[in-house]
Image (cartoon, helix red, strand yellow):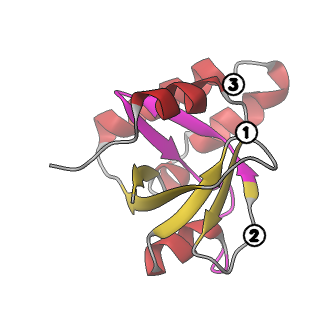
Amino acid sequence: MTRRLPKRLLAALHASAILRIRAGSDHRFLGIWVVVVRGRAFVRPWDDSPTGWRRAFLENPNGAIRLEKDGPDVRVRARPVRGERLYDAIDDAYAAKYPTAANRRWVRGFHTAKRRRTTMELLPR
C-alpha cells in the first residue's frame, strides 16, 4: 500500500494558492498550482520542458515542497499517474480551486490531453 501525505498537509495544500516545488536537490524552488483529489495531491507542469521539474522527477523522484516562500522544506517524491477518471477529477479540482477569469486560460490549458498526461502525484518520502 502506498503511503499518503498527512491529512494536515493535504489541507494546507488545498488551501494554498501556490506551492513551491523542487525536483531533486539541484533545481531551485518554483511556484506551481497544486490540487487535492480523494485525499491525494497532484501537480501538472504548464511547460513540460526537458530541463523542467517534471522531467527531473522522472529521472529522480525525490524532491521537496514548501507552502511558504521561506517555509520549511517538506520532503516528497513524485510519481506519474494515469487514468481518465482521475484526470477528469483533477481537471474539476483545478477549475474549482482557480475559478477567476484571470485563471480561466490556465485551467483550460491544464485540461488538454498533452498536459493531463504530465500529471504527477506527490507522496511522502
Tell which tag, 1 or 3, sits nearer the viewer: 1
Amino acid type at image mark 1: Ile
The Cα–Cα distance between marks 2 and 1, rounded to whole angstroms, is: 15 Å
Residue 98 disc label: 3
Q: Residue at x 61, y 53 (%)?
A: 65
Specify start and end residues of the magenta stretch as a single range: 31-51
Residue drawn 68% across the image and 41% down it: 67
List x then y, in percent, for residue 97.
63, 22
Residues packed near mark 3 inside 10 Å, few (<14), some (14 to 19) or many (20 plus)? some
Callout 2 touching callout 1 (CB < 8 Å):
no
Label ID, residue 87: none
Q: Judge from the rendering whether residue 88 lies leftward or rightward of residue 14; answer left or right.
A: left
> Could you tell me how far apart the alpha carbons at marks 1 and 3 are, in whole angstroms?
11 Å
Q: Position of residue 27 (x, y in %)?
A: 70, 75
Please state the horizontal and vertical placement of residue 23, each as a whole percent of the image.
59, 69
Type of amino acid at the residue the image marks with label 3: Tyr
Q: CA distance from mark 2 to mark 3?
A: 25 Å
What is the quadrant of residue 46 in the picture? bottom right
- Position of residue 4 relative to residue 115, above or below, is above
Could you say whether the residue bearing mark 2 is in a helix, strand or loop? loop
Q: Is residue 48 visible?
A: no
Q: Which of the two discs, 2 and 3, sits closer to the camera?
A: 2
Dot 2 or dot 3, earlier in sequence: 2
Q: Is residue 37 magenta?
A: yes
Give me the disc on residue 28.
Answer: 2
Q: Report which residue position mark 1 lands on.
A: 18
Q: Residue at x 57, y 75 (%)?
A: 24
